[in-house]
Image: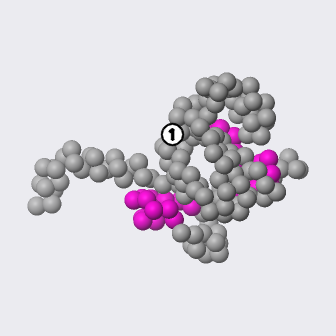
Amino acid sequence: SNETWYLFGETYSDEWNENLLQYYEKPPCVACARDDLVALAFGIGNRGSGVQWHVHGPGFSEAIWGRKHWVMYPERPDNFSPNETSRHWMEYKYTALSEDDRPLECTLSPGEMIYFPDAWYHATINLDPYTAFVSTFTQEHMVAQRSDDDDDHPAEEQHASM
């Protein structure tokens, strides 16, 4: 661990916002227009660092400096252990996969962005001596769900507004 360091998360404080995140231009999405529906997080890491397989709500991640490799599956991958790093998975598990069993993958370069769908499993690994990125966690799926719910109950809304 002394060769791979990684800082991510816990960047929601006023200090992070005032000195860095307020200057970040959010992605063009419905939820991104509302501050109450997004959370920004800054991250930086050394070559070989990254996050192991995990899942959460939808969002975007943009590489600011350096390259970041992403792997994604729509469902939980069978061949991972929460005790192994993403680097270990890439070097030992990924290389043993057949072409058909490999995840969707891409490498982000500075200025490039990826959208990760709600509940998709993903892992990352930083490829350069340091990689800086900003992730935008959205509630985009909640906006769409609320809109669908409103369409299902127009009479209730009409009655409530009288």
Residue at 62% from the left image edge and 66% from the top image edge: 13
Question: Helix or strand or loop: what does disc 1 sit on?
Answer: loop
Q: Position of residue 104 (x, y in %)?
A: 59, 37
Residue at 78% from the left image edge and 58% from the top image edge: 130
Q: Is residue 21 above or below residue 140?
A: below
Q: Is residue 130 above or below residue 122?
A: below
Image quarter of the C terminus: bottom left
Residue at 65% from the left image edge and 38% from the top image edge: 53
Q: In the image, is residue 125 part of the stretch drawn in magenta?
A: no
Q: Is residue 48 left or right of residue 26?
A: right
Q: Quadrant of residue 88?
A: top right
User: Viewer-proximal residue, 111 or 118?
Assistant: 111
Q: Which residue is mark 1?
A: 119
Q: Position of residue 79 (x, y in %)?
A: 68, 26
For the magenta stretch, what is the residue range?
A: 26-54
Q: Kindly identify the amino acid type of the residue bearing the numbered disc 1.
A: Ala
Residue at 62% from the left image edge and 41% from the top image edge: 105
